[in-house]
Image (cartoon, rainbow, N blue to C red):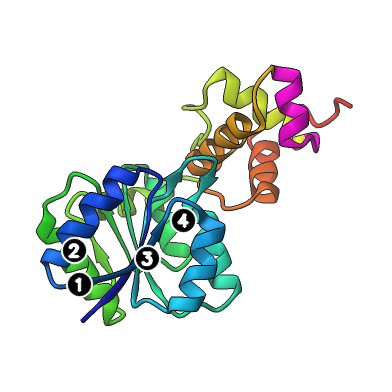
Amino acid sequence: MIRLYLVDDHQIMREGLRVLLQAWNYKVVGETADTTEALAAIQRLNPDVLLLDLQLEGRSGLELLANMHRHNVATRCEVLTMSAQPRMVAEALRMGALGYVLKGSPGRELANAIEAAAVGRRYLGSNVAELAVQSFTQGDDEDPISSLSPRERQTIAMVVRGMSSAEIGRQLHLSPKTVATYRSRLMAKLGVSDVPALVRQAIRHKLVDTDLP
């Protein structure tokens, strides 16, 4: 029996998935919305397959993928997300995910993806293969920041200047948790897994004026 671990920040989604997966004779050994908790649990429980959402409240699922790689975690990962951005598909695959399925796809696709991941085979959902091709055919000059909101642009400028979530929150009159959510969205939209990579992307695409103090 294939053993699964679920990471999704919507409890109702996790509950529904658990019922569905158990009906398909899979064993769900754990679940969480928190990437730090997930890493510790995956190392302890050693599930066969991780089902991972990339858009988590306050964090990015890519961070968990990066940490799993850093700690040589053997569990295979299948991304299950709403994010249909070519850059996200490419980054998830580059960081070790064996497959990518969009939420809203037929249940059979998810089952096929789990079966493939369990034996180390790659699987892309029916609408994802084209996204993967797009990600590899886009030129280097493709602008990855065109979808950023004004508040996200404001946040990334402060991150580049080394400000903490608490400092950014005080200046923008937001809670640190809200700032962390903006930062997570930035990472997801730019296809990066940590703050240093976020800063490099911002500088590369001239999103901030690095000459300012």
Disc 4 element: helix
Labelled pair 4, 2 in contact (Cβ < 8 Å): no
- Residue at numbered disc 3: 30
Is 93 situated left or right of 209 in this image?
left
- Residue at numbered disc 2: 21
Point 46% across, 27% down: residue: 147
| Image location of residue 94, percent across then percent down | 46, 63
Labelled pair 1, 2 in contact (Cβ < 8 Å): yes
Point 58% across, 26% down: residue: 152
Is 154 situated left or right of 111 in this image?
right
Alpha carbon distance from label 3 to label 1? 12 Å
Residue 91, numbered circle: 4
Alpha carbon distance from label 2 to label 3? 12 Å
- Local crowd size for mark 1, using a 10 Å CA cut-off: few (<14), some (14–19), many (≥20): some
First of labels 2, 3 by sequence position: 2
Three-letter code, disc 2: Leu
For the record, the magenta segment spans 161-172
Disc 2 element: helix
- Residue 28 image-quadrant placement: bottom left
- Local crowd size for mark 2, using a 10 Å CA cut-off: few (<14), some (14–19), many (≥20): some
Alpha carbon distance from label 1 to label 4? 28 Å
First of labels 1, 2 by sequence position: 2
Three-letter code, disc 3: Gly
Three-letter code, disc 1: Tyr
Disc 1 element: loop
